[in-house]
Image (tube, rainbow, N blue to C red):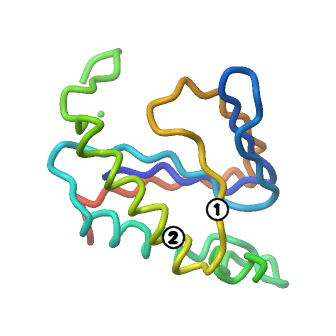
Amino acid sequence: MIAVIQRVLSASVKIENQIRSQIENGLLILIGIEETDNDDDGEWLSNKIINLRIFNDVAGVMNLSIKDIASTKKGNRPSYIKAAKPEIAIPIYERFLKQVESTLDKKIQTGEFGADMKVSLVNDGPVTIIIDTKNKN
């Protein structure tokens, strides 16, 4: 699994010109699931993301995680050859979402797997991090 994580001041997702989800101050996470990924990758990735210390503390130092602020790759065209088929990817995606919600003890906002989405965001920093479960160093 690959995640592109962006710290945002706000973000929203539209599907068929209707707002599906929107947030203020938080993380926008784009997830890619390959055919070789499994639930272990999802669990590792969700824990890694939730514990990333990328939000500023009172001193302005990136020292807080989303837990701390939450209330309560060839050529010029992208390749999807390694992408998992929906019957494999959707259950992993759904379990990943449940893992994040369970750890945060909070409902999270999502898009819709496989939908044509229009994502808007105001990047904060900008802070953008890419994590690949194939490189768990």
In the picture, measured across the screen, residue 22 lies left or right of residue 104, that is right
Compared with 60, 2 (above or below) is above
Asked if 63 appears above or below 80 in the picture, the reply is below
From the top left corner, tell me how far across and down residue 2 is, in percent: 35, 50
Q: Is label 2 in a helix, a strand or a loop? A: helix
- Which is nearer the eye, 123 or 114? 114
In the rendered structure, the answer to whether residue 125 lies left or right of residue 27 reads right
- Residue lying at the far left of the rendered structure: 36
Crowding around mark 2 (Cα neighbors within 10 Å: few <14, some 14 to 19, many 20+) is: many
Between residue 49 and residue 54, name the one nearer to us.
49
Task: Measure the C-alpha gap from mark 1 to mark 2.
Answer: 8 Å
Among the 4 quarters of the image, the one containing residue 57: bottom right
Residue 36: x and y in percent read: 15, 49
The one of 59 and 91 positioned closer to us in this rendering:
91
Residue 125 percent coordinates (x, y): 73, 54
Q: Which residue is mark 2?
A: 100
The structure residue drawn at horizontal position 25% and vertical position 40%, both measured from the top left corner, is 87
Q: Is residue 112 left or right of residue 119?
A: left
- The local crowd at label 1, few if under 14, some if 14 to 19, many if 20 or more residues have their Cα within 10 Å, is some
The three-letter amino acid code for the residue at tag 1 is Ile
The disc at residue 108 is: 1
Q: Estimate the x, y position of residue 22 in percent, counting from the top left.
A: 76, 47
Q: Residue at x 72, y 45 (%)?
A: 21
> On the picture, is 16 further left or further right than 41?
right
Where's the C terminus, which quadrant? bottom left
| SS for callout 1 | loop
Name which residue type carries label 2: Val
